[in-house]
Amino acid sequence: MNPQLKNLIELQAIDSQISELEHGKAAIPKQIESGKAGVKEQKNQLMEAESSLAQLQKERKGLEVDVIAENDHAAKTKVKLSSVKTNKEYSAILVEVDAVKQKILVLEDRELELMEILEEKEKELIPLKASCKEEEESFNVYKLKKEAEAERTEKELEVIRPRRSQAANNLEVKLLEHYTKIFKARDGVVVVPIQENICQGCLQQILPQQVIDVKCGEIIIYCEQCARILYWKETKEDAVPK
């Protein structure tokens, strides 16, 4: 095989590895943010539930105060009965006392209703708190794992990048210029094999003579459609003696 073609294949393999590592590393911050969003959503649900519970507790305390006030009102109104002078005044006070009693009954009914609701809400909070805690702990482990992955990936890149520089330096200037140009234009895929006479870069048919030249591997052959550099990758079928 042409030494320059061999260098090109090596450079492409290194660049593909670098690209894969860099894409993986670049995705990590978004993955962490996605996990953080899940924790935030759980916390928001818990906060809403706790806020709802607090409002109900506040309403219940208000009802307790109102019941005490109305009972006091009823007691003071009854005291007036001993000092009335007419049946009309007496009847009016009794009506007022009955109205207060009815109001107290309504308040107490609502208080009982709230007690049942509060009991149910407090029960609902238990699994919600546990779920929120579990989600946060799970995220913390996930975050550490992803940060370690990012650090490990960067170390791999630190090892590979010098190899990339060396592989690029091994190429002739014009070849490197062509490689760089196509690398930018074709999403980092420059050197591709042909399979069944098809360029694996653009999936276009390769001329028979070019296929022969590619198989020979003595000269650099470019795809006439996409300008990628072609090489012959031996398959298991090719390796079997005819």
Image (tube, rainbow, N blue to C red):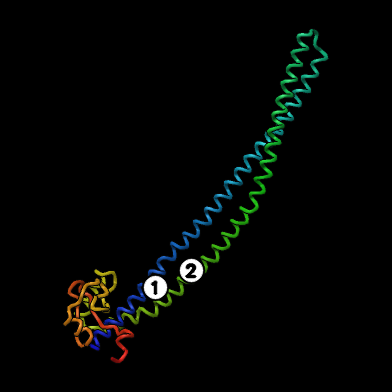
Q: Position of residue 99 (x, y in %)?
A: 71, 21
What's under tag 1, amino acid-wise? Leu
What's under tag 2, amino acid-wise? Glu
Residue lying farthest to the right in this orientation: 82
Q: Secondary structure at mark 2?
A: helix
Q: Position of residue 56 (x, y in %)?
A: 64, 39
The residue depicted at 17 percent of the width and 78 percent of the height is: 207
Residue 164 or residue 134, whichever sits in front: 134
Residue 184 or residue 120, whichever sits in front: 120
Q: Position of residue 129 (x, y in %)?
A: 62, 54
Residue denoted by label 1: 21
Q: Is residue 218 above or below residue 122?
A: below
Q: Is residue 226 above or below residue 137?
A: below
The residue mark sitting in front, 1 or 2, is 1
Q: Secondary structure at mark 1?
A: helix
Quadrant in the picture for residue 210: bottom left
The residue depicted at 27 percent of the width and 81 percent of the height is: 8
Asked if residue 27 lies left or right of residue 143, the reply is left
Q: Which mark is residue 147?
A: 2
User: Which quarter of the image is occupied by the C terminus?
Assistant: bottom left
Query: Around disc 2, counting alpha carbons within 10 Å, would you say few (fewer than 14), some (14 to 19), or many (20 or more)?
Result: some
Residue 209 or residue 201, whichever sits in front: 209
Quadrant in the picture for residue 70: top right
